[in-house]
Image (cartoon, grey):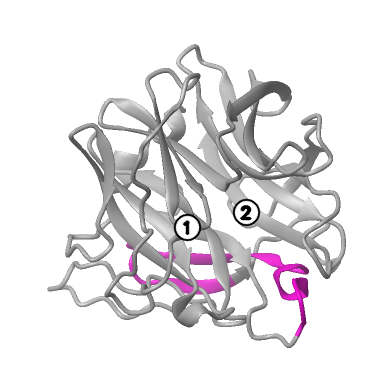
């Protein structure tokens, strides 16, 4: 089932919206990767049940990880949900982080037991691996020294180790970290950003420095670093004002950056158009100007993601 608008070969502007979920109308927390084995782009996302009558917060629980594919990153076909050995139990799955290293795919995904009526209770980050992005093998539940951790993102450190950033809801909903030598065994490494509550970090390199973009619920907060250790906040958030594109008139939420070479990236995010439950996935261009990360959601730009420019995503070999 094709869920995005058909591409006009003479118009390379980013489709708006980029993707809508054909089952529950609530795609959030998007992650986009390219599979060199098939040549397809893959979109994984939290499949919120926006069109269901559940009251309170129940409709954002009991969610699967939605999955769509595209030959060009522009026109998407919904292919179902990410299939793991325990993904059919009516539990809650959020915020997939997907990366490829040495020919193997890794997914770090938030898991909550059951369908909850509010935002409380235990949450954990689970690790899965895959050879083909279709079938996922459970590897472990990460011990991150907290019973309420969500929203993992991973990037390689300059010394070759891996670092994970995540939201620790037990510690003020601040961004905490864990380190790994091999992407399998993780050890807590302390706080990263503690200025205010936030969630959904994405970490990437652009313009010769590192950036962390998080969801501050009033736009996307931006922090800058030269070493992935020390972070400095940018005074101006991204996507805090309404956009003019279709279904892009609301705040931007929980984003993921796909680098396109050293100086440009695409930012995938979701919005709640009209302020209701419904959500859509959008894409805008990121670049660095005068030392600040910039994103004009109304900009007309050529959107045709290039696999060759994403090979070193997150600092690891593909």
Q: Quadrant of residue 115?
A: bottom right
Q: Position of residue 24 (x, y in %)?
A: 62, 81
Q: Position of residue 294 (x, y in %)?
A: 26, 46
Q: Residues within 10 Å of mark 1 (few under 14, many from 20)?
A: some
Residue 226 image label: none
Residue that appears at 34% across and 69% down = 242
Q: Quadrant of residue 113?
A: bottom right
Q: Secondary structure at mark 1?
A: loop
Whether residue 295 is in magenta: the answer is no
For the residues labelled 1 and 2, the Cα–Cα distance comes to: 19 Å
Along the viewing direction, whichever of 26 and 276 lies nearer the viewer: 276
Tally of numbered discs: 2
**Is there any visible trace of residue 91 in the rendered image?**
yes
**The C terminus appears in which quarter of the rendering?**
top left
Along the viewing direction, whichever of 81 and 31 lies nearer the viewer: 31
- The residue wearing badge 2 is 95
Q: Position of residue 234 (x, y in %)?
A: 36, 37
Q: Secondary structure at mark 2?
A: strand
- In the picture shown, does residue 276 fall above or below 308? below
Residue that appears at 38% across and 59% down = 240
**Is there any visible trace of residue 261 in the rendered image?**
no
Along the viewing direction, whichever of 209 and 142 lies nearer the viewer: 209
Along the viewing direction, whichever of 3 and 217 lies nearer the viewer: 217
Question: Bounds of the magenta span?
Answer: 54-79
Q: Residues within 10 Å of mark 2 (few under 14, many from 20)?
A: many
Q: Earlier in the sequence, mark 1 or mark 2?
A: 2
Do residues under tags 1 and 2 come within 8 Å of each other at their CB atoms? no
Residue 218 image label: 1
Residue that appears at 53% across and 41% down = 99
């Amino acid at each position: 089932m094709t869920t995005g608008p058909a591409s006009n070969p003479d118009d390379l502007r980013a489709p708006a919206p980029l993707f809508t979920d054909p089952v529950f109308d609530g795609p959030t927390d998007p992650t986009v990767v390219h599979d060199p084995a098939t040549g397809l782009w893959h979109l994984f996302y939290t499949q919120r049940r926006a069109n269901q009558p559940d009251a309170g917060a129940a409709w954002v629980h009991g969610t699967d990880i939605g999955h769509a594919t595209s030959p060009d990153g522009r026109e998407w076909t919904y292919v179902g949900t990410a299939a793991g050995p325990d993904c059919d139990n009516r539990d809650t799955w959020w915020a997939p982080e997907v990366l490829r290293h040495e020919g193997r795919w890794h997914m770090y995904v938030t898991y909550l037991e059951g369908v909850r009526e509010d935002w409380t209770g235990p949450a954990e980050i689970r690790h899965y691996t895959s050879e083909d992005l279709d079938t996922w093998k459970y590897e472990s539940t990460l011990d991150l020294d907290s019973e309420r951790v969500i929203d993992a993102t991973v990037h390689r450190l300059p010394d070759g180790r891996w670092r994970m950033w995540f939201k620790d809801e037990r510690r003020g909903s601040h961004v905490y970290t864990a380190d790994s030598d091999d992407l399998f065994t993780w050890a807590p490494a302390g706080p990263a950003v503690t200025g205010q509550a936030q969630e959904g970090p994405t970490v990437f390199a652009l313009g010769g420095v590192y950036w962390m973009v998080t969801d501050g619920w009033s736009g996307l907060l931006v922090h800058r670093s030269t070493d992935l250790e020390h972070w400095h906040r940018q005074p101006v958030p991204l996507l805090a004002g309404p956009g003019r594109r279709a279904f892009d008139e609301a705040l931007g939420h929980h984003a993921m950056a796909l680098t396109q070479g050293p100086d440009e990236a695409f930012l995938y995010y979701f919005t709640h158009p009209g302020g209701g439950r419904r959500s859509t996935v959008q894409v805008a261009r990121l670049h660095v100007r005068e030392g600040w990360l910039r994103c004009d959601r109304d900009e007309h730009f050529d959107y045709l993601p290039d696999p060759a420019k994403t090979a070193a995503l997150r600092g690891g070999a593909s």
